[in-house]
Amino acid sequence: MPNKQNQFLIPLHKTFWGREEEKAAIAAMRSGTGVGDLAFSEALAKEISKKLDVSYVLPTGSGTAALELACALLLKRGHEVILPSFTFSSCANAILLAGAMPVFADIDINTYNLDPVEIEKKITKKTKAIMVVHYAGMACAMDKIMQIANENNLYVIEDAAHALGASYGGKSLGTIGNVGCFSFHGTKNAASGEGGAFATNDKQIFKIAEIIREKGTNRSSFMRGERKKYSWVKVGRSLILSDILSAIALEQIKKLDKITLLRRKNSEYFLKKLKKISSKIILPRISEGTDPNWHIFAIRAPRLLRDKIIKALRNYGIEASFHYLPLHQSQMGKKLGCKTKDLPVSEEVASTLIRLPMHPKLTKSEIDYIVAALEKIL
């Protein structure tokens, strides 16, 4: 089968898979039918709980599934949820599927994450939650956001799809709010192809979540031997992760510290080499008290030059790319009544951002090649 990544000398992403993942997948296939919540799924939940110091974890079919689970249990029809527009459609979809309404707030020009000042402007009597997105593995201003949430009796849902292994004030991202949602998509730092996880420190939230996740049944408590039979008790969905993919994800979580360290070393080298052209581009900025996982390494260039730079880098065999079209500017955003120039910072970031290759297998010589190409282009 053709591999689209082969068209680039240096691709954006590379999985950090080895024999361990192969052996684990085969073991899972040989041990059962591959359905979820078997031995590898249970081990994955325990490993994530230990790694992140969070009380309860449920593996899910995707990061999107984790978001849908969070919204299904925390929201009702008529509620509003404040979130960034500069994010993936899964965030808004999860809110809409729960019958609630996404309310887009602008982002900070330095972190590309929700601006607490803009959050406060969007709060109404209908607001029920804030959905933060830790873009690129860089932490949102969680102290201020949690303060706003507490003062207004709001839930905080952390979309930590980019942020596994990153921290804020010594706490793992995805464990600070009421609920954290993670992704094991093939492009993520810990990858099982598809997959995700739902995490919380709230026992009551966990109990409801495991029912919704298991098609609205109390099968999970039955499997733990807490009841003689299980039945349908609530409206639910099928959001469980296959035990085969859980086995792969488990090996990735075991390697997470190494993966994060390699990404940090690459980012440090990138920042060092790019200093000589820092007057022509905007480099990533790390907020005080945060420890990013460098899921994405993004620079910004003048709006009129951005697309030309991406095209030129691709001509050098470097898979550079833009990122999200802000959701408020999308076709669906317009249907929700959003206007094109509602969120100027989101629009500025989206039109100037360039993603450069970043993964654990990236070498110094490849980074040198990317920087040299940028020097020629700029």
Image (cartoon, rainbow, N blue to C red):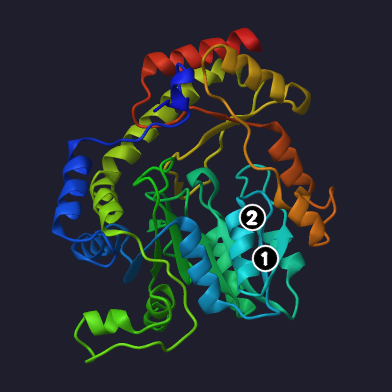
The amino acid beneath tag 2 is Leu
**Quadrant assignment for the N terminus:** top left
Q: Are marks 1 and 2 in contact (CB under 8 Å)?
A: yes
At horizontal 71% and vertical 47% (from top left) the residue drawn is 326
Residue 279 appears in the picture as rendered: no
Count of residue discs: 2
Pick the residue in front: 221 or 155: 221
Q: Which mark is residue 82?
A: 1
Q: Which mark is residue 161?
A: none
Vertical side of 213 occupied by 10: above or below:
above
Packing grade of label 1 (10 A; few <14, some 14-19, many >=20) is: many
**Is residue 273 rendered to the left or right of residue 111?**
left
**Is residue 150 rendered to the left or right of residue 206?**
right
Q: Position of residue 117 (x, y in %)?
A: 71, 60
At horizontal 19% and vertical 54% (from top left) the residue drawn is 28
Vertical side of 257 occupied by 284: above or below:
above
Q: Which residue bears the numbered disc 2?
A: 114
Question: How far is the residue under mark 1 from the one under mark 2?
Answer: 9 Å
Closer to the N terminus: mark 1 or mark 2? 1
At horizontal 42% and vertical 16% (from top left) the residue drawn is 366
Judged from the image, the secondary structure of the residue bearing numbered disc 2 is: loop
Packing grade of label 2 (10 A; few <14, some 14-19, many >=20) is: many
Residue 322 appears in the picture as rendered: yes
Q: Position of residue 102 (x, y in %)?
A: 69, 65
Question: On the image, which quarter does residue 169 sit in?
Answer: bottom left
Q: Position of residue 79 (x, y in %)?
A: 68, 77
